[in-house]
Amino acid sequence: MKTTILLTALVSAVLSADQFSGHQEAFSADSALVTFGALCSGNNSNRKRGCDSRYGCGNYGASRDGGKRKHMGLDIVCADGATVYAPFDVTLAGRSIPYKKNNAINDGVTLKVQGLCFKLFYLKPDKYTGTVKKGQRIGTLLPMQTVYPGITSHVHVQMCDKSDPTKYF
């Protein structure tokens, strides 16, 4: 009987330690999230676009088209013509375009890093493939005001799986 109780206590202790260890690993993974460096010249803090009376808000999940769809990215303030930088060491994984119909801001690039895939829209990349180090120039913000007069110009950051990118800022 004493052996059974001792064995049960030992198994419980090992299982608890394994569970605790798993929680530590999950906590470490969460706290080791990739954090975006400055995306745009003139906005070193990655200030997010607020709400424009005519065009809506720049946060993930914001309503679009009168509630028919949701904003699937996060908008980071950037002036038309400003330099867009690599937010960390990245692999450029090809062109990514936001619209079906062409316009003056219909360009962007897909970036990959540490198992993450995300897209940056409304910029003219210097190149679409290769690698870029954190803080190096990726391209130039396209003229948003020609397509959306009065909007706060911005880089649109969208995860490839359309999940919320906010936790990376």
Image (spheres, grey):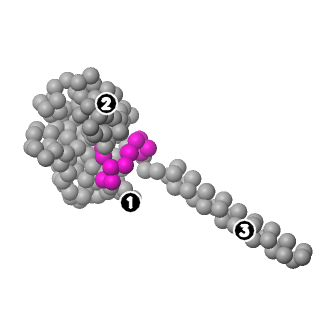
Mark 3 closeness class: few <14, some 14–19, many ≥20 residues within 10 Å:
few
Callout 1, which amino acid?
Answer: Gly
Mark 2 Cα-neighbour bin, 10 Å: few <14, some 14–19, many ≥20? many
Place residue 77 in its image quadrant: top left
- Label 2: element kind: strand
The answer to whether residue 43 of the structure is visible from this angle is no
Which residue is the site of mark 3? 14
SS state under label 3:
helix
Q: Which residue is mark 1?
A: 115
Q: Seen from this angle, which residue lies furthest right? A: 2
The amino acid pointed to by label 2 is Cys
Return the disc, 2 or 1, that comes first in the chain's sequence.
Answer: 2
Q: Position of residue 65 (x, y in %)?
A: 23, 34
**Type of amino acid at the residue the image marks with label 3:** Val
- 26, 12: nearer the viewer: 12
User: Which numbered tag is attached to residue 57?
Assistant: 2
Task: Tell me which segment is drawn in magenta.
Answer: 157-169
Q: Residue at x 23, y 38 (%)?
A: 83
Q: Which dot, 2 or 1, sits closer to the camera?
A: 2
Q: Quadrant of the N terminus?
A: bottom right
Does the magenta segment cover residue 67? no
Give the x, y percent position of residue 123: 19, 42
* On screen, residue 41 above or below 93: above
